[in-house]
Image (cartoon, rainbow, N blue to C red):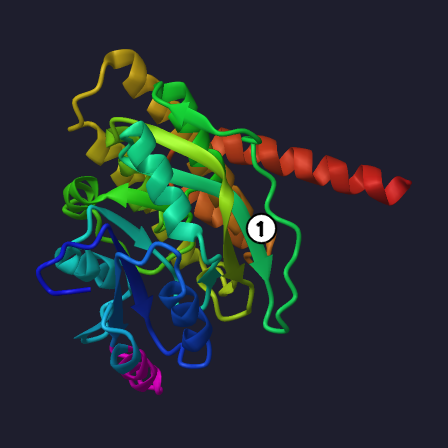
């Protein structure tokens, strides 16, 4: 692809010490059936051989670009990629994952057909380091669907907050990137994806193509939960709600989005709190929020969880 030719899609790959996994990830991107893409590898201060791997792919394929930065976290790496992205649309891939060869062709075609700001695939397949691919995550959507109403978009908050199964318009990404500033955290993707869902003019859900995401102990979602990290997850949703106050929304839509954001926050923080060592630490976190609505929601979930446990033990 020549320098003066704008790519159709910019793929942003934040990289931090994933040299072992990068070849599979970048090979899948270089093999895309949509050729007019650029692959922006944001090396976030890696201390392993990640940069060497990226340079090898740069030499092999002119569409691959290396952008280096001091270690600042995945959020800043993504924002750096957005600043450099020239594509009409922008996608994100984690550097230890890979995608089907028609991944970006399928998303781009759907986005263009509907003139949508976001195209989403619900075909998400987990796999492990042995290469075993597991059944896909369950999805509420089994048919292609255009989402315009607040209620429909809000339901996505509960099921697909991740960035990487979507394609976003460049303009939308740049707008939301100005609001996006989070540390690596189990909930940080939502700080970007939820505002995108709200501000997009139109979204399209498709049932293909496939994204494969790696399950291993070093990923953010498997890292140890501490009271401090849990408090940060809770705070992320507070900032999302505060940011949404500045959006030009009708009162009914605002209430709808707020309801689902709170639902997602309460569910996330309850699930994460169960990974704390004991009930004392869990209750201490709940008390520190000073949020009566969240506290009641957490207590109800906890009582249901304890009741289910007791019922199962009696069987």
Q: Position of residue 137 (x, y in %)?
A: 59, 45
Residue extending farthest left: 4
Residue holding disc 1: 274
Residue 49 part of the magenta segment: yes
Q: Residues within 10 Å of mark 1 (few under 14, many from 20)?
A: some
Vertical arrangement, residue 42 with respect to residue 190, above or below: below
Q: Position of residue 195 (x, y in %)?
A: 27, 36
What residue span does the magenta drawing correspond to? 45-57
Q: Position of residue 281 (x, y in %)?
A: 52, 54
* Left or right of 247 on screen, residue 163: right
Vertical arrangement, residue 49 with respect to residue 142, above or below: below
Rendered image quadrant of residue 66: bottom left
State the residue in front, 249 or 109.
109
* Left or right of 122 on screen, residue 259: left
Vertical arrangement, residue 226 with respect to residue 113, above or below: below
**Residue drawn at x 22%, y 34% as measured from the top left:** 242
Vertical arrangement, residue 196 with respect to residue 216, above or below: above
Image quarter of the N terminus: bottom left
**Residue drawn at x 59%, y 72% as measured from the top left:** 129
State the residue in front, 279 or 74.
74
């Amino acid at each position: 692809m020549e320098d003066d030719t704008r790519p159709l899609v910019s793929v942003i790959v934040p990289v931090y010490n994933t040299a072992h996994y990068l070849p599979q990830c970048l090979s899948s991107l270089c093999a895309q059936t949509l050729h007019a893409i650029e692959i922006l590898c944001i090396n976030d201060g890696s201390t392993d051989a990640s940069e060497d791997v990226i340079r090898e792919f740069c030499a092999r394929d002119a569409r691959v670009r290396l952008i280096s930065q001091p270690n600042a976290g995945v959020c800043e790496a993504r924002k750096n990629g957005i600043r450099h992205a020239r594509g009409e649309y922008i996608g994100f891939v984690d550097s230890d994952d890979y995608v089907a060869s028609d991944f970006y062709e399928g998303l781009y075609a759907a986005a263009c057909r509907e003139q949508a700001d976001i195209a989403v695939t619900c075909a998400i397949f987990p796999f492990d380091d042995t290469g075993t691919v597991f059944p896909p995550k369950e999805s509420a959507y089994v048919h292609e669907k255009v989402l315009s109403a607040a209620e429909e978009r809000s339901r996505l908050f509960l099921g697909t907050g991740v960035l990487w199964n979507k394609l976003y318009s460049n303009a939308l990404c740049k707008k939301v990137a100005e609001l996006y500033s989070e540390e690596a955290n189990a909930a940080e993707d939502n700080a970007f994806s939820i505002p995108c869902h709200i501000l997009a003019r139109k979204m399209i859900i498709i049932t293909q193509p496939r994204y494969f995401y790696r399950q291993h102990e070093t990923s953010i979602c498997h890292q140890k939960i501490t009271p401090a990290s849990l408090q940060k997850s809770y705070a992320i949703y507070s900032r999302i709600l505060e940011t949404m106050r500045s959006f030009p929304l009708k009162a009914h839509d605002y209430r709808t989005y707020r309801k689902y954001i709170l639902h997602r926050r309460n569910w996330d923080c309850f699930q994460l709190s169960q990974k704390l060592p004991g009930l004392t630490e869990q209750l201490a976190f709940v008390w520190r929020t000073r949020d009566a609505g969240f506290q009641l929601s957490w207590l109800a979930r906890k009582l249901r969880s304890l009741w289910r446990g007791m019922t199962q033990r009696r069987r």
